[in-house]
Image (spheres, rainbow, N blue to C red):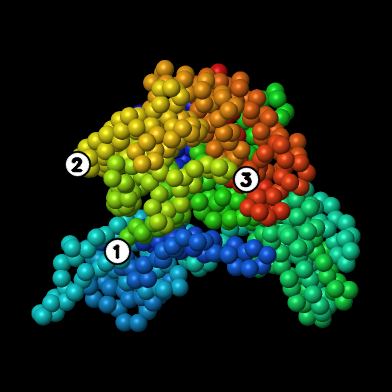
């Protein structure tokens, strides 16, 4: 395989060959049985909306702040078949529906239909505003699977003679499935599995108890043998200090109980915690407290062990962090935000290829993030997060070879890229406009004014992704256009931003002039994008990456890219030490999952604060768990 990124070469282990074989074997097997089918991308949009609106902050509902799209409420499904013998097909449908055989509708809402031998078209039109229109068809040979075609824009009409029109004007796509194979468990009822667990330690705390579940976890608190009349308050904490801070903990539950007989009670919403502080009136009794751990059923396919116990622990905690942040989709953190952020997800895709090789969670997340046309804003409103979405698609194809995914969603790639190109400034550069969030990283004093070199690099890589995708689906005109745009932009980037006196790309250009500021971001990305000459790489290594006078990075999010660039420059020993100091530093403070941000200069409970809140920091954050990727880089390059 001709890898698009040099760094991908160091990430393709022998185990991936087995994983890819299993991926395609699963896909083939899925077509031999009936499954629930939906319109492509709609279930991801609907389910991500449902999942992302579960977030609360001190019991107040806290939804995402970007536009949420919805599923198409009216969908037509059909299949052309040739039966050697008559057969009966059972129908299960989510929504109101009609069923047609060769254009003639059956009366009412049939639960099964008789199909004569011969050639036929079976079609179902389904309306569902509350959930995703879905069908499950099961006959001897006729089953619902991805060979069915589906559309939201059925252009069928009847002419004056009563004859149905030709449907050639209608755009059909192959139906999608999550391999839900139980007709009595429709897609709208899907939930992640749970398992019961107990606290490892409990102690009396005032008029209540303080529980320690031993490590960061995620799920539902269960009050066993709850009885009485009065109030129960539950305060959750990723740290002990947070759980004990009833005025500042990020998440909590207040309950009014009127239960004369003992009864088990499970909280309605999942929470992230290690510690739980439960306070209740004297009139209330509770036999004991446990939890239902919610988890995504993904298996570890990657393993690692070495002679250094700390490196082994770093790997294990990073892997556990990804497990926790893998829900129906890859989310950022389990306490907050519990949302699907493209920048966080991009790193989770890479870690997933090492650890789980769970392709479905990657594609669901990509589709949930993309949403629907027309495009009216950047993904998550963040300019750089739109570009990470393109990069995620390219990596996905490199690891899986799933050409069908590219073919099916190439139009959405085109429309999103059209949106980006329409927002360039007069010099052809991306620059923040009204409604855009130019993020890059959480870093104090980081200027976002003007056209930033970092954003231009990500656009250039995204255009290269578009060019390769266009070639893949044989869009020769599109491929030529995207290649030229990428090549022209790369030339312009170095003509505009490279400063030979500073031996680096400067951070930004304002009013056509270079600023004096040099940051690590554009320079480290240019290394593993392989945009620099060898001479430029060495200059950047000495004058930027190993220069303590250049603003340091404190988030695991960008620390990952910085150390990856150093790995590419042969600095494995340095990276190993940095990994042990940085991620090992969190372990030394008792971390059982990796954090959103770590600053070794902070002390005590200062580590838990962020966003102006004493416990605002996420202590289980997807972008914190990327250290296992360096282990692969180090092993490959040594």
Tell me the SS state at disc 1. Answer: strand
The label shown at residue 477 is 2
Measured in 3D between alpha carbons, the distance from the residue under mark 2 to the one under mark 3, in whole angstroms, is 43 Å
Measured in 3D between alpha carbons, the distance from the residue under mark 1 to the one under mark 2, in whole angstroms, is 27 Å
Q: Which residue is mark 3?
A: 596
Check the image and report above or below for 332 versus 627: below
Q: Which residue is mark 1?
A: 151
Residue 550, horizontal then vertical, whole percent: 55, 30
The label shown at residue 62 is none
- Which is more toward the observer, 391 or 163? 391
Residue 305, horizontal then vertical, whole percent: 65, 28
Disc on the earlier residue, 2 or 3: 2
Task: Place residue 263 in its image quadrant.
Answer: bottom right
Do callouts 1 and 2 mark residues in contact (Cβ within 8 Å)?
no
Q: Residue at x 62, y 45 (%)?
A: 596
Q: Nearer the viewer, mark 1 or mark 2?
A: 2
Residue 585 seen in this snapshot? yes
Q: Nearer the viewer, mark 3 or mark 1?
A: 3
């Amino acid at each position: 395989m001709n890898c698009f990124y040099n760094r991908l070469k160091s990430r393709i282990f022998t185990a991936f060959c087995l994983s890819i074989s299993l991926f395609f074997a699963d896909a083939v097997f899925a077509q031999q049985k009936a499954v629930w089918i939906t319109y492509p991308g709609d279930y991801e949009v609907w389910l991500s909306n449902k999942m992302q609106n579960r977030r609360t902050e001190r019991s107040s509902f806290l939804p995402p702040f970007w536009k949420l799209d919805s599923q198409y409420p009216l969908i037509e499904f059909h299949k052309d078949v040739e039966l050697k013998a008559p057969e009966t097909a059972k129908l299960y449908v989510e929504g109101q529906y009609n069923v047609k055989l060769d254009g003639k509708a059956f009366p009412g809402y049939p639960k099964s239909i008789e199909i004569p031998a011969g050639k036929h078209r079976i079609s179902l039109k389904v309306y569902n505003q509350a959930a995703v229109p879905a069908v499950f068809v099961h006959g001897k040979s006729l089953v619902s699977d991805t060979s069915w075609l589906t559309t939201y824009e059925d252009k069928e009409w009847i002419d004056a003679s009563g004859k149905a029109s030709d449907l050639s004007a209608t755009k059909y796509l192959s139906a999608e499935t999550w391999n839900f194979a139980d007709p009595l468990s429709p897609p709208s009822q899907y939930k992640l599995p749970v398992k019961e667990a107990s606290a490892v330690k409990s102690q009396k705390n005032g008029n209540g108890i303080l529980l320690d579940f031993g490590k960061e976890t995620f799920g539902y608190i269960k009050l066993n043998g709850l009885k009485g009349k009065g109030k129960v308050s539950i305060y959750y904490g990723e740290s002990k200090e947070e759980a004990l801070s009833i005025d500042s903990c990020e998440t909590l539950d207040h309950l009014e109980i009127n239960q004369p007989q003992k009864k088990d009670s499970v909280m309605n919403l999942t929470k992230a915690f290690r510690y739980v502080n439960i306070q209740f009136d004297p009139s209330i009794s509770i036999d004991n407290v446990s939890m239902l751990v919610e988890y995504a059923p993904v298996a570890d396919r990657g393993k690692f062990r070495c002679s250094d116990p700390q490196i082994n622990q770093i790997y294990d905690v990073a892997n556990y962090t990804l497990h926790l942040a893998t829900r129906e989709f890859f989310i950022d953190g389990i306490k907050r935000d519990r949302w699907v952020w493209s920048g966080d997800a991009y790193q989770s895709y890479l870690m997933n290829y090492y650890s789980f090789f769970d392709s479905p969670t990657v594609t669901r997340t990509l589709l949930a993030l993309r949403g629907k046309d027309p495009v009216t804003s950047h993904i998550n409103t963040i300019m750089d997060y739109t570009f990470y979405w393109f990069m995620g698609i390219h990596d996905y194809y490199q690891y899986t070879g799933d050409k069908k995914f590219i073919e099916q969603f190439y139009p959405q790639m085109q429309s999103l890229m059209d949106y980006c190109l329409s927002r360039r400034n007069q010099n052809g550069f991306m620059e923040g406009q009204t409604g855009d969030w130019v993020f890059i990283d959480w870093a104090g004093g980081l200027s976002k004014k003007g056209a930033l070199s970092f954003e231009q690099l990500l656009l250039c890589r995204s255009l290269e992704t578009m060019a390769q995708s266009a070639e893949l689906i044989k869009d020769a005109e599109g491929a030529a256009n995207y290649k030229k745009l990428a090549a022209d932009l790369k030339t312009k980037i170095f003509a505009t931003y490279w400063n030979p006196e500073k031996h680096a790309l400067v951070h930004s250009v304002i009013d056509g002039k270079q600023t004096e500021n040099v940051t690590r971001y554009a320079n480290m990305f240019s290394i593993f994008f392989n945009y620099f000459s060898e001479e430029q790489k060495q200059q950047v290594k000495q004058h930027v990456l190993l220069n303590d006078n250049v603003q340091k990075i404190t988030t695991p999010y960008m620390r990952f890219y910085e150390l990856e660039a150093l790995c590419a420059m042969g600095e494995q020993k340095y990276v190993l030490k940095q990994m042990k100091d940085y991620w090992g530093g969190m372990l030394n403070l008792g971390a059982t999952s990796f954090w959103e941000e770590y600053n070794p200069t902070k002390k005590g409970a200062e580590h838990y604060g962020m966003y102006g809140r004493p416990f605002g920091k996420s202590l289980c954050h997807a972008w914190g768990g990327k250290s296992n990727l360096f282990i692969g880089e180090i092993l490959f390059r040594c």
